[in-house]
Image (spheres, rainbow, N blue to C red):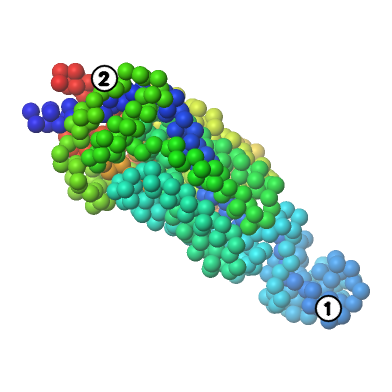
Amino acid sequence: MFNCLRFQVTMKFDSILDKADGFGRYQIALALLLFIPRITIPCHFLLNNFIAAIPSHHCNISSLVADGILGNLSREERLTVSIPVQEDGTPASCHMFSYPQFHLLMNSSNSTALPVVECQNGWEYDNSTFISTLATQFDLVCDKRGLAKTSVTIFFLGVMAGAVFFGVLCDKYGRRSMLLVSYVLSIVFSVASAFSSTYIMFAAFRFLTGLALSGIVNISVGLSIEWVDTEHRTFMGVFGSISWSLGNMLLAGFAYLVTDWRMLIITVTSPLLLATATWWWIPESARWLIANGEAETAYKYLQKCANFNKRRDFSSRVKPESLSTVATMDQQGHSYTYLDLVKTPQLRRLTLFTGIVWYGVSSTYYGISLNITSFGLDFYLTHFIYAAIEVPAKILIYLSLNKVGRRVTQSGTLVLTGFCILINIITPTEFWTFRTVIAVLGKGLSEASFTTVFLYTTELYPTVMRQNGLGYTSFMARLGASISPLIMLLEDKWTLLPEVIFCTLAIFSGLIAWLLPETNNARLPETIEDIEEMRNLSISQQRIRETFL
């Protein structure tokens, strides 16, 4: 009887939200307000595709010109006598002749056996595409070439730390206040990174930028889902994810127009100024307020929701004192930590499986997204195509999530992504058109799996642990994202090794996703007890039980 009573109590919030209209103008306004900062997220997460680009370069021979050694030779002749030629006919990037080889002006076909040394006076860069990048600013070329990709890893380590940091604070201090903290810190650290004078300084501020942006990612997703009814959770989740695709496409345009890395960082951060100005209109999560014993404040937000949605009879149908019965006594005053994720059997199982899935989803997605130069196309165009394919993928996912459910969609998109990578592994490089089509299809599927996992995870974890759960899974995702650039460096050992690893991760995590419970049309769990005692019930059993209670 006690369990039955608890079931009635913890599931009552959805019926209260229905009386205020669980999907009306209030929820649409909230989604649009959160749309603004979420546009910035993909711009920062994939920013290194442009600010860390390495343009064509060769050793700087201006000192030889200044000393008069090269006389009145033309630029092409100076390069001929000073720098060896690579197999493709372009000047070598990291070596120069130990002394000028003037005889090459007569016969430049035999220069392979001549003595060379590493660049002595820095490098000259091709500035036709970029005015300035990290590589040209800090000379991240030749033996320092790996530092350009390492900066991506450092950024995602910051995102990973932020997932833990904000996961704890959001469940303790609320979603709304920590969202403002995320906005302000993201602006401050991003601008600071843009004015960095050394690579170490830049890396440190990029780490902190990642930490701050992580709060925006997790809080905006959780907050939008917690204010919507069961029927429209899928729409809210997919609509919110459109901001990623839009921001991703805008990044290609921003990078094309702004070719200085410092100004590009400031440009993609600027939407957060508008987001900060509109923060005052964003409500706190009524679910979180009730779960933390702040029923009166929750009632005020629910009244605003009802009034905005033109539900004038809300006050007569729902009394303030009725909200105090929504949260069970053992919730109030209890502070949850990440340790609670592994204290009970069902939640422990859920934690293990979602962690594996998030790692696989993120590692595969960024393994594809950060490799935009492998097909020989203009990388602005490649980036835009990769971003644009996400939109139809999200539309198909919206239909799939409602028709076949979360579990099948999550597992299917991951496994199919793995097969797309596998097809490109076994397809000869001369079939570049076919390989490009398969790569774009794989990119769309990987984004579909990312869209699904955000919504799916939000529905799996209970309200009292939702931000902790999202913090943990985001930690695992950023771990995958931070390691992806390092995996790509393994192509120096074997060209196909990174693709083999990403293929294996996608298929394995897709199979693990099949072990998760279905949440389509199920009510959001509010407490850990909901997970342990009631998530095994079928949706039909839940509805029958609720009817009789």
Disc 1 secondary structure class: helix
Q: Residues within 10 Å of mark 2 (few under 14, many from 20)?
A: few
Would residue 473 be visible to someone looking at this image? no
Specify the quadrant that holds the N terminus.
top left
Q: Is residue 164 something that shows in the picture?
A: yes
* Residue farthest along the left direction in this orientation: 1
Disc 2 marks which amino acid? Arg
Which residue is pictured at 66% across the width and 43% down the height?
Answer: 253
- Give x and y (percent) for residue 537: 20, 28
Q: Amino acid at mark 1?
A: Ala
> Which mark, by number, is residue 66?
1
Label of residue 110 in the image: none
Front disc: 2 or 1? 2
Q: Secondary structure at mark 2?
A: helix
65 versus 232 height, above or below? below
Residue at (76% x, 65% y) in the render: 91
Can you tell which mark lies on residue 317? 2
Q: Quadrant of residue 111?
A: bottom right
**Residue 342, image x, y percentages:** 22, 49
The CA span between labels 2 and 1 is: 86 Å
Q: Nearer the viewer, residue 536 or 134?
A: 134
Query: Along the polypeptide, which appears first: circle 2 or circle 1?
Result: 1
Going by the image, does 365 lie left or right of 297? Answer: right
Q: Is residue 406 left or right of residue 242?
A: left
**Spot occupied by residue 363 in the image (x, y as percentages of width and height):** 45, 49
Q: Is residue 524 above or below residue 311?
A: below
Mark 1 neighbour density, 10 Å: few (under 14) some (14–19) many (20 or more): few
Q: Quadrant of residue 230?
A: top left
Q: Quadrant of the C terminus?
A: top left
